[in-house]
Image (cartoon, rainbow, N blue to C red):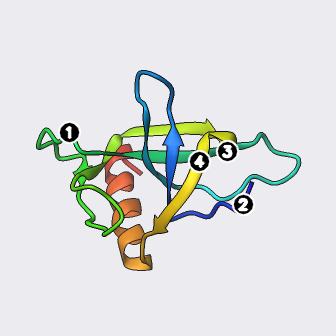
Amino acid sequence: MPAVNPGEIWMTDFGMAAKVRPALVLTGEPAAEELDLVTVVLHTTALRGSRWELNLPKAFLKPGAFHLQQIQTVSTVKLERRLGALTADEMKRVLDALGTRLGI
């Protein structure tokens, strides 16, 4: 498995119900003694106009948004391929919005 870094967007297999879709990695690659897990936020094209949909247009993504109510922890084996990454400013927007969402 290649290195996984916060801010990267990977095609991720969420199983039959949620399918394979882009997800933004929030946590770094686990250390050898840790569980092989990363926390991600899903990207969706099925927009509902929710305040928790964060639109960050990227050339490698279909029009849509990162859905801040769709935070999940998955095994790194579910990460299929790296699509690209957010800029530092874009990642700050995500983390600020997640802080608001989580009340921290």
**Closest to the observer: 18 or 6?**
18
Determine crowd level at label 3: few under 14, some 14-19, many 20+ residues with C-alpha closer than 10 A.
Answer: many
- Say if 9 sits above or below 20 in the image: below
Horizontal arrangement in the rendering, residue 19 relative to residue 56 (left or right): right
Badge nearest the viewer, 3 or 4: 4
Q: Picture coordinates of residue 31 (x, y %)?
A: 81, 54
Q: Which mark is residue 95?
A: none
Q: CA distance from mark 4 to mark 2?
A: 10 Å
**Which badge, 3 or 2, is on the more N-terminal residue?**
2
Q: Earlier in the sequence, mark 4 or mark 2?
A: 2
Give 23 or 6, whichever is nearer the viewer.
23
Local secondary structure at mark 3: helix
Residue denoted by label 2: 2
Q: Residue at x 72, y 60 (%)?
A: 2
Q: Which residue is mark 4?
A: 80
Q: Look at the numbered disc 2 and give the secondary structure of its residue.
A: loop
Q: Which residue is mark 1?
A: 46
Report the amino acid beneath label 3: Thr
Q: Are marks 3 and 1 in contact (CB under 8 Å)?
A: no
For the residues bearing labels 1 and 2, Cβ distance under 8 angstroms? no
Q: Position of residue 89 (x, y in %)?
A: 37, 78
Q: Look at label 1 and name its amino acid.
A: Ala
* Image point (41%, 61%), residue name: 95
Tell me the quarter of the image containing the N terminus: bottom right
| Dot 1: element | loop
Per the image, the residue denoted by label 3 is 76
Spatial CA distance of label 4 from label 1 is 22 Å
* Residue 8 shows in the view: no
User: Is label 4 or label 1 in front?
Assistant: 4
